[in-house]
Amino acid sequence: MFELTEKDLENMKNHKYKTTGYSTLDNKMNPFWTYCANLLPYKYSPNMVTLTGSFCHLFGVFIIVFYDYTLSKELPNYVYFVFALMLFLGQTFDAIDGKHARNTNRSSSLGQLMDHGCDAMDNFTFCIMICQSHLLGPMISCFVEIGIQQNYYAYTLEENFTGVIRTNTNDFGVTEIQFLSMILCLFPIFDRHFLDYFEFFGTIKINILMFYITLIFSIVTNTYLIITDSNGLKDAWNKWNKMIPLCIFNFFEFLASRFIIFNKYAYFILILNGLYYTLFAAKLIICNMSKKKINNFDIDMIIYDVLIGIGYLIKNEFLEKIIFCLLTLWLIYRFNVVIVGTIKKLLNYLKMSF
């Protein structure tokens, strides 16, 4: 189980937030973000600003439930506009929460935990919106989600080694990816079959290529981060093996995509997978801040892997539904214990309100 000691809480309180700095686009957006931060009233707490950004992303994903569970059906044009708008609002709230905290003298370690925990959740929401916008379908959407999980986890793991959060590489980072995501969501408004026009080597469709690009990019990113932060092969291996539990989880996510019910309910299953990933990433973020040892044998990963493995082997539609219901109930329980529990403990320790 995931327990925090008095020493862990003290380490979280004293944790210093360090990044690789702003990109060129960040600097161009900063005047707008500063203006928005100055508009926020004092009673609107920085943590609520962070949550509002995530709620924007969740709202964008929620709209899909009224039209399609497979991520392969065309939606009304207004939905794609809402996707882009929610991504923009989410980006804005994410950028101004820290500024609002500094403006009101309420910066805290809880703010960092909230910010990066919500970022982990936002990963799967913008993934689903993009995949739905371009009708990538259940299987490709699953692989894209896995690739995004690998990248974010690798960057978060890097902080555990270096104490610095990488916000951009070669002047390309989070803000650039967010704007690219907005543009991709808007394309279907002007041409619903935009990606269908692109073929490579005469046979490879762009949606298949996106899978390969995501997969290769995640592997290259992980290898690059680990090698550049390591002293020799032994040190590189000791760091890379921290990725193994996530790789195993990703493998079982792939097995879940082979379930009988997956093609009919991909939307719900990808959300569930994304929330389990959010739980794993949140624990890594807590370990980074508290200097707690990363546990390679995570109880939540084991339960997910075992239940998905059973469902994959037996191949029964009713059993698959039972498995996902059990996984949902376990997830709700563990979110309350790990994430809500940590927030409550930190609030009490810091003697502050949310």
Image (cartoon, helix red, strand yellow):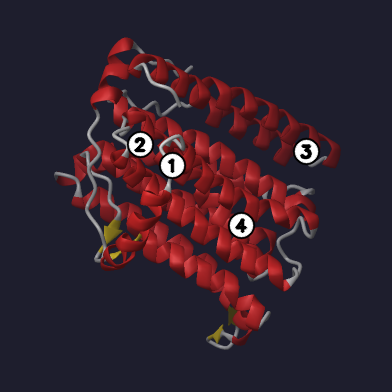
Which residue does the image show at 38% across and 50% down from the upper left?
37
Classify mark 1: residues with Cα within 10 Å, few (<14), some (14-19) or many (20+).
few
Q: Which residue is mark 4?
A: 128
| 23 displayed left or right of 185 | left
Spatial CA distance of label 3 from label 1 is 48 Å
Classify mark 3: residues with Cα within 10 Å, few (<14), some (14-19) or many (20+).
many
Number of marks present in the image shown: 4
Q: Amino acid at mark 2?
A: Gln
Mark 2 or mark 4: whose residue is earlier in sequence:
2
Spatial CA distance of label 4 from label 1 is 33 Å
Classify mark 2: residues with Cα within 10 Å, few (<14), some (14-19) or many (20+).
many
Classify mark 4: residues with Cα within 10 Å, few (<14), some (14-19) or many (20+).
many
Residue located farthest toward the left when viewing the structure as drawn: 231
Residue 314 image position (x, y, % from top left) = 77, 37
Residue 336 image position (x, y, % from top left) = 57, 23
Which residue does the image show at 35% across and 43% down from the upper left?
100
**Secondary structure under badge 2?**
helix
Which residue does the image show at 40% across and 14% down from the upper left?
348
**Secondary structure under badge 4?**
helix
Mark 3 or mark 1: whose residue is earlier in sequence:
1
Q: Which residue is mark 2?
A: 112
Query: Given contact means CB atoms under 8 Å apart, are the residues at marks 4 and 1 in contact?
Result: no
Q: Which residue is mark 1?
A: 41
Q: Which residue is mark 3?
A: 320
Mark 2 or mark 3: whose residue is earlier in sequence:
2
Q: Amino acid at mark 4?
A: Ile
